[in-house]
Image: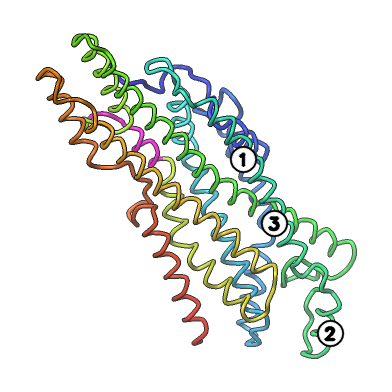
Amino acid sequence: MAPTTVNKKVSITCMPASLSILRTFLAFPSKNTELEPGIVFYLKFLGVSLLGSLPMLSSIMHLINTVQNGKFHHIDLDLTYAVSFSTAYALIWAFIIKIKSAAKMYTFISDFEVFGKPTDFDRCNKAFNRYAKIHFVYLELLIWTIILTSNIFKTQKCKLENQLYNMNEVCGLFSYTWMPFDIDYSPIRELYLLFEIFGAHHIYMLAGLMAWQVFETMQHIIIRIRHVKHVMVEAFTYRDSTVRRRKFNIAVRYHNSIFGLFSYCYRLEEKLNDAFSIFMFTHMVLTAAVLGIGIYSWLRVKSLSTFMVCTGWFVGLFMDCFSGQRLQDESLELAVAVYNLPWYDCEEPLKKDIMVVLQKCQSSLKLRAGAFGVMDRAMFLGVIKLTYSYITLLKQT
């Protein structure tokens, strides 16, 4: 019997709360269209993305204008918002362009026809639905804190700076803003602010939700790894050698569908990294810059908004590196469980099967950041060290 495939119609039953939230933000296809979302899905998301680009555009335009004028006024805040929003966009589109691969993986995880449902699937699915909602509330609180502690309520301070430094900043907006046309009059200024708030909320929320999506996906893969271990151990509870080997061969096929014992098998690790490796690569390359610039900005102006931006990116980085490390640890624990089976009392053909499985178990599943490396503790520490290098460099300039 071949490993399960994704060609048949299988409803996605894993992580319903998280996928429902993503659908609300138009970042995941509707039910029954996940594998073929169609051009309309991408056009809708593109439209919303363009609508939410105003905070990024405002910060970049103000940064360019400030540098050209040689005033360098609030350049650190401009850099924080420009880099964090640009990174968020890069992450979001790295996820969206691989949405079909993610849907195939979720279909695979939700397929119980061949190997049955993991014993703790329903319990863990229910628990992570609750955690996803808690994470959603955390993101809302974090992002509204970023918005409300930005420049929106600093109008008087902004006007005073305009008088002291002979500037003409538009006061009362989310970020320092420069546009080639006048927006500093009602109701244009108020409409501009509304679009900035929408963009800041939508883009930061999506970046946080997608980081959580990777984290929760890792937990479901770990559930599958534990189920493989359970099926293998259960096979050795049968005294009849024929039944025992038949049950173990089923476990081997299950193991093969996840780890891939043979080169022609399209294993779960390949599905995982096909869906998320570009996202992780973008995360690792750019997050250090966001943290470094954000912390430097906070040290200079003590802005709570920039501090919360750094907090959000730090938590997202930690979640994905932590889940990648757990994935490696759980897959290596499977080798220990197989080795501890009473294989030495079994018939020779079964011993050979076990040796093949043990050999394959020496390599763990890995969440990769493209060619950049593997998401684990070492990667997390590497990004933190690079963050410190950015801070040091900015202090010296």
- Taking 54 as reference, is 152 left or right? right
Q: How many marks?
A: 3
> Of callouts 3 and 1, which one flags the residue occurring earlier in the amino acid sequence?
1
Mark with earlier residue (1, 2): 1
Neighbourhood count class around disc 1 (C-alpha, 10 Å): few under 14, some 14–19, many 20 upward = many
Q: Nearer the viewer, residue 214 or 178?
A: 214
Q: Helix or strand or loop: what does disc 1 sit on? A: helix
**Dot placed on the residue nearer the N-terminal end, 2 or 3:** 3
Magenta span includes 285: no
- Residue linked to disc 2: 160
As displayed, is residue 16 above or below residue 3?
Answer: below
Report, in whole angstroms, how far the alpha carbon at label 2 lies from the one at label 3: 27 Å
Percent of width and height locating residue 356: 16, 30
**Residues under labels 1 and 2: Cα distance?**
44 Å
What is the span of residues highlighted in magenta in the rendered image?
A: 264-274
What kind of residue is marked 3? Ile
Question: Which quarter of the figure has residue 188?
Answer: bottom right
Which residue is at 56% across, 32% downward? 15
| Amino acid of disc 2 | Leu
Check the image and name the residue furthest to the left: 348
Task: State the separation of the CA atoms marked 3 and 1.
Answer: 16 Å
Q: Which amino acid type is shown beneath numbered disc 1?
A: Ala
User: Could you say which disc has been placed on residue 132 in the image?
Assistant: 1
Instruction: Determine which residue is flagged by label 3.
Output: 143
Q: Nearer the viewer, mark 3 or mark 1?
A: 1
**What secondary structure is marked by label 2?**
helix
